């Protein structure tokens, strides 16, 4: 039998996001959180502060983590062929994996096998 939950716990509730460091981040988070809020009459319509939302969207600093990981590293064709043969990867994926691990075939293969790649 399930134990009763405290009255402060609501089904479907998620943990709040980590606190933000700057005032601009807090303002942006508040503007974005209004997108999830419903109005009082329950129709599902949402009031959005357009100005705050625009400012929040402009302040977002979205970077592709994969693009940062790819370094300008010269990889050996023999290492690419090794990864293609042993790990059954395409040449492009093998090259990207080697670039992520600074051209080290051993580190790339270890990361791939352990699931850290």
Image: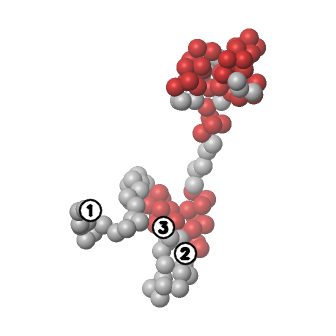
Rendered image quadrant of residue 78 = top right
Alpha carbon distance from label 3 to label 2 = 11 Å
Labels 1 and 3 touching (C-beta < 8 A): no
- For the residues marked 2 and 1, what is the alpha-carbon distance in whole angstroms? 42 Å
Query: Mark 3 or mark 2: which comes first in sequence?
Result: 3
Q: Quadrant of the C terminus?
A: top right
Q: Please give the residue where the numbered disc 3 appears in the rendered image.
A: 33
- Identify the mark at residue 2; answer none if there is no mark: 1
Residue 36: x %, y % from top left = 50, 70
Using the image, determine if residue 17 lies above or below residue 115: below
From the viewer's perspective, tell me whether residue 11 is left or right of residue 96.
left
Q: Name which of mark 2 and mark 1 comes first in the sequence.
A: 1
Q: Secondary structure at mark 3?
A: helix
- Is residue 87 something that shows in the picture? yes
Q: Earlier in the sequence, mark 1 or mark 3?
A: 1
Image point 75% across, 27% down: which residue? 90
Q: Position of residue 39 (x, y in %)?
A: 48, 82
Where disc 2 sits, the SS reads loop
Marks 2 and 3: in contact by CB < 8 Å? no
Local packing at callout 2 (Cα closer than 10 Å; few below 14, some 14-19, many 20+) is few
Q: Is residue 29 above or below residue 50?
A: above
From the image, tell me which residue sits under label 2.
49
Task: Identify the residue at horizontal 62%, vertical 26% (top origin).
Answer: 100
Instruction: Determine whether the residue tagged by mark 1 lies in a helix, strand or loop.
Output: loop
């Amino acid at each position: 039998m399930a134990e009763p939950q405290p009255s402060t716990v609501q089904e479907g509730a998620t943990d709040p996001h980590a606190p933000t460091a700057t005032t601009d981040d807090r303002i942006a988070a508040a503007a974005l959180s209004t997108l999830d809020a419903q109005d009082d009459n329950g129709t599902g319509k949402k009031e959005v502060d357009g100005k705050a939302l625009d400012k929040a969207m402009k302040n977002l600093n979205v970077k592709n983590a994969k693009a940062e990981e790819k370094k300008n590293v010269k990889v050996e064709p023999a290492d690419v062929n090794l990864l293609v043969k042993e790990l059954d990867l395409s040449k492009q994926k093998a090259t990207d994996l080697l670039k992520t691990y600074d051209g080290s075939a051993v580190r790339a293969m270890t990361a791939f096998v352990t699931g850290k790649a």
